[in-house]
Amino acid sequence: MATTVKNKPKPRRIKESKTILFRQTTLAKAGATCAIINGDSRVELLAFKEKVDLIVTSPPYADARHKHYDSIHPDDFVEWFLSFHEPFYNALKPTGSLVINIKDKVVDGVRHRYVWQTIEALSKAGWYSIEDYLWYKPNPMPGYWPNRLRDGWEYCFHLAKSKRPFFNPDGVRKPIGEWVESRLKNLGKNDLSRHNSANESGFGRDISKWVGKQTVLPSNVLSIPLVGKNKGHPAVFPVDLPLFFIKLLCPENGLVVDPFAGSGTTGIAALSLGRSCILIDNNLKYCEEAVKRVQEEAAATPNEVKFEQHDLAYQLRFIQEAKSEK
């Protein structure tokens, strides 16, 4: 008797179709706009030559969070970051500034100095290194290491195209503090004129000049707690960090850019101050999270949504990312 062989099902073939995916959403609040773009900032910023007042960002740290961004070895970080030099420089106005929040990485028990090497390379490329700020974290993550303690701070480097970029220190003044009332209550003879240092260092002070003042300029050490939740991104900085630099370095009605925008914290800060902003990230999921957060936390409303057709390879990239995180 002949045996009937059933036809085996043919393997399904994925059609070379195109799918509509998120490309850009523009949100608006009180006259200011926030454009959230899924793309490479080196390309997207070509359309904004000398239109940007402030770039404030926290780029992916070297060899960190492999599942979320392309891994960059510390030895290769300088070369990688310099690929953003011209797009950043050309996008800024002559009075514009670049603020980079970043932290060194420990490699085999030793601090790798790729961060300082990057800043030195940018200086050689034409940037002026204006100031170094420290973000002090009063609630650093717990942990134990054989030769070091918890990381309680991070760098914030201020670079600019000129030695005199836009700078508004009055925008970040803070209350002088309760100490002034008791200290100035009974001024002595040495407090009514400049009192030079006893060690002849050249430094001096005149305490009487504090009389009547209600505010004082802050120092370059910013005490800002870490956020409690990651907000859909593994490395969210607190809103108060970009908020400080936007107040200090971006004029009213100015334009702020975050080229590694993550889940959109810079956009929330910018809109809260009435500044328009552009958020760029090459990770689609983070862009979608940024749209959600800016709407919810900055009370912004959709103004315009743009989509693009992406081919199969583009779709598979995001499918693979999703699988790797499960």
Image (cartoon, rainbow, N blue to C red):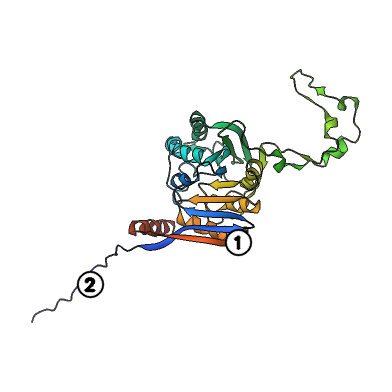
Which of the two discs, 1 and 2, sits closer to the camera?
Answer: 1
The answer, for residue 308, to whether it is visible in the render is yes
Task: Classify 10 Å Cα crowding around label 2: few (below 14), some (14-19), many (20 and above).
Answer: few
Disc 2 on helix, strand or loop?
Answer: loop
| Quadrant in the picture for residue 96 | top right
Q: Give me the disc on residue 9.
A: 2
> Amino acid type of disc 2?
Pro
What residue appears at the point 53 percent right and 51 percent down from the top-left corner? Answer: 279
Task: Classify 10 Å Cα crowding around label 1: few (below 14), some (14-19), many (20 and above).
Answer: few
> Amino acid type of disc 1?
Glu
The image shows residue 217 at horizontal and vertical percentages of 73, 38
Real-space Cα separation, disc 1 to disc 2, in angstroms: 48 Å
Q: Earlier in the sequence, mark 1 or mark 2?
A: 2
Q: Is residue 187 left or right of residue 130?
A: right
What residue appears at the point 61 percent right and 35 percent down from the top-left corner? Answer: 165
User: Label 1: which residue?
Assistant: 296
The image shows residue 281 at horizontal and vertical percentages of 48, 51
